[in-house]
Image (cartoon, rainbow, N blue to C red):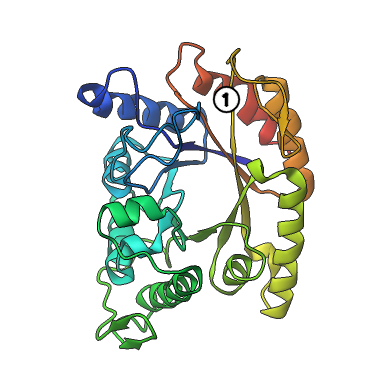
Amino acid sequence: MKIGLQIPNFTFPGGKEAFAEDIKEISTQVDKAGFDSLWVMDHFFQIGSEESWLLGPAEEDMYEGYSVLNYIAALTKNVKLGTMVTGNIYRHPGMLVKTVTSLDILSKGRAYLGIGAGWFERESIGLGIPFYDWTVRFEMLEEALQITKLMWSEKNGEEFKGKHYHLKETMCHPQPIHKYPPILIGGMGPNKTLRLVAKYADACNLFIGRGMNAVEEAIKVLKKHCENENRPYEEIEKTSLGSVFLDQPDISDKTQMGVKNLKTVEDIIENLKMQAKMGIDHALFNMRDPLASQEPLKVFKDEIIPVAADL
């Protein structure tokens, strides 16, 4: 099993003056520690609340995701890079494909395209981005996936006429380093999201916080969609996203949705074994402060990643 780190929070003790150095320290440690991937939020407001330990209120610091990833690309050599995940409504799909293509080339082929329909109404309305109803957002997402596939193919440059998008020239020159960056769709919706994974994506992301039973059920549903789409299920990388609270005494020991809060190395390894049994290939974790005094990145390097490699 591969291990990745997601950075969901940008409010570090040094503030904005030290932010560039903090991100440099995190990304270089991750690159050397054996993590397979590094992900950042694609939001413009923070998405938590004042009561949230991991994610604070909207007013906390949030940076534009692809600007941060391009900076990280210049600092790293091995780790794969992506957003967890881009809200499709925030960028026109033609511009998004060009953005991710640039990241892929600058990182020498290490980009993912993480994408979803978009859900955070407050930041959309707050910044003047049109926020459509659920049905329309998923129609737009499917067209964006079709555009992406077209632009990352020998047919790039052809006209695309959809219900929501019209591109006279789907041109993408240069093309990405490899055939195309893996497309990862985030979410667990059984009727729309997982169907789009089976039809268009190279990877999915399932949220451990919803409960292990919910993740297991999502995998079963994905298999059925793959059968319906005549798509080999094995082609799709199954990734997960969960939170760790290493050495955080103020975090409850209670379980949420049947998932024990991961506060120790033993907790994390036990959880990874459960994920591996269900078929997860790539487990992503986030934490409040990767540079905390407890050195959580070093703990992952020395005690967790080597064990995960054998699962």
- SS for dot 1: helix
Would residue 170 appear left or right of 135 to someone viewing this image?
Answer: left
Foreground of the two, 245 or 170:
245
- Can the viewer see residue 279 in this picture? no
Q: Position of residue 7 (x, y in %)?
A: 43, 36
Which percent across, then down, holds residue 287?
51, 29
Locate the N terminus and report the quarter of the image it occupies.
Answer: top right
Q: Quadrant of the C terminus?
A: top right
Whether 134 is drawn above or below 107: the answer is: below
In this rendering, the answer to whether 66 lies above or below 46 is below
In front: 133, or 300? Answer: 133
Taking 274 as reference, is 15 above or below it?
A: above
Residue designated by label 1: 300
The residue shown at (58%, 23%) is: 245
Picture quadrant where residue 248 is located = top right
The image quadrant of residue 13 is top left
Identified at 30% across, 35% down, the residue is 75
